[in-house]
Amino acid sequence: MAPTRHPAKPLNMTLAEADMRHGTGQEEPAAGGFLSLQGLGKRYQGFTAVHHLYLDVPRGELVALLGPSGCGKTTTLRMIAGLTPVSGGRVLVGGRDMTSEPPYRRDMGLVFQSYALFPHMTVERNVAFGLEMRRIGRAEVAERVKEAVAMVRLQGLEKRRPRELSGGQQQRVALARALVIQPSILLFDEPLSNLDAKLRDEMRTEIRDIQQRLGITAVFVTHDQAEALAMCDKVAVMNAGRLEQLGTPTELYERPANPFVASFVGRINRLPAMAMGTKAKVGERELRLTQPMEGNIEVMVRPHRIQLEPAGSAATESTNRVQGEIRRTTYVGDLIQYVVHVDGLNWSVEQPTSASATLSPIGAKVDLSWRVEDTLAFKSAG
């Protein structure tokens, strides 16, 4: 049975406005999100890929599922889309249980990592495919394809085939194909991983602009922390099939919930220490903590929060300070990266460059200083 046909919604109108106009939209429940995962789980024989995941995505927000390979983020996305059956829990959209619905009834658009374009079809035919499967009239298909192609800036390329397009253009075709069906939720499965660095930056800006312009709810799977922090309203950090922390990019970066989140979201120095109240010993150095702790802990400091100063610089009450020796310098354009040896441990330090900056020489004795507030501390796992 073909899905029910609804009146066309102009792509330059927000989905919330279009839903109010046509009376076909799903309302966000009073509690929870427009998309709500309630105890979602996936088990295979002898292996659990996702453990009882709870996650709410409010209408109009872009939320990232971030984590290393094998953490369960793509499995979660496929369960949301209906491509992978769930082993437990529910998928709700606007308060409606979609767990048992087939993919074509979920009103979701999916942008794949591999683009998944039909090689024998032109750009406009690829974009039109989903509409034709829904038996939309030709005139409406033509109008909606024209709008979608314009939105992703592919005018003039409608007659080309995928092999005649760059990687970035192919990704735009995949995005237009997902948008043209006017879904209530847009799902991205690592869509930028096959692009070079410059194209990734351009495409993530374009995707975010389009998502905000349409006010569409979206879930974005990635292992790239920079993508997640730069694009998304909230980030769900996953590890071994479990949700470690959900928060805004600022919350995750500045107030990580545990050592895994602290080390996965951004670069960081991890140093074993012994805590005694608001003080901790790292090697022979005593550091101040923001909260009292006892016993074995890990002290963590982000490299770019550390200042590199001449040895013997005056200490202050608001900073922690250690002395070490520079072992390696690396110039990477916008940053100079240093490895500084302190009491048998190597510390990473990053300093911004300037036209007049000179690299501190290898072997130089230096002080490392940083604000006490930038000292993260967690109980040791052991």
Image (spheres, grey):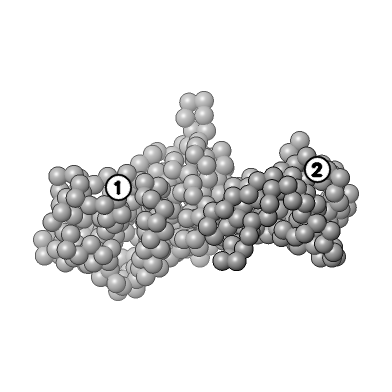
Residue 256 visible in the displayed image: no
Tell me what residue is drawn at x 44 percent, y 41 percent.
75
Which numbered dot is residue 316? none
Residue at far top of view? 46
Residue that badge 1 annotates: 115
Quarter of the image with the C terminus is top right
Out of 329 and 96, give the one closest to the viewer.
329
Name the spot of residue 90 as percent of width and height, x first: 46, 47
- In the rendered structure, which disc, 1 or 2, sits on the residue that comes first in sequence? 1
Query: Position of 199 compared to 234: left or right?
Result: left
Out of 59 and 160, give the one closest to the viewer.
160
Tell me what residue is drawn at x 62 percent, y 52 percent.
337
Q: Secondary structure at mark 2?
A: loop
Give the residue type at disc 2: Asp
Name the spot of residue 134 as percent of width and height, x first: 19, 54
Tell me what residue is drawn at x 49 percent, y 61 percent.
230
Q: Residues within 10 Å of mark 2 (few under 14, many from 20)?
A: some
Which numbered dot is residue 343? 2
Q: Residues within 10 Å of mark 1 (few under 14, many from 20)?
A: many
Give the residue type at disc 1: Tyr
Q: Quadrant of residue 140?
A: bottom left
Cα separation, mark 1 vs mark 2, equals: 50 Å
Out of 335 and 39, give the one closest to the viewer.
335
Residue at far right of view? 276
Name the spot of residue 201 as percent of width and height, x first: 41, 58
Query: Position of 352 compared to 60: left or right?
Result: right
- Between disc 1 and disc 2, the foreground one is 2
Name the spot of residue 40 as percent of width and height, x first: 50, 44
Q: Quadrant of residue 79?
A: top left
**Vertical arrangement, residue 98 with respect to residue 14, above or below:** above
Residue at far left of view? 138
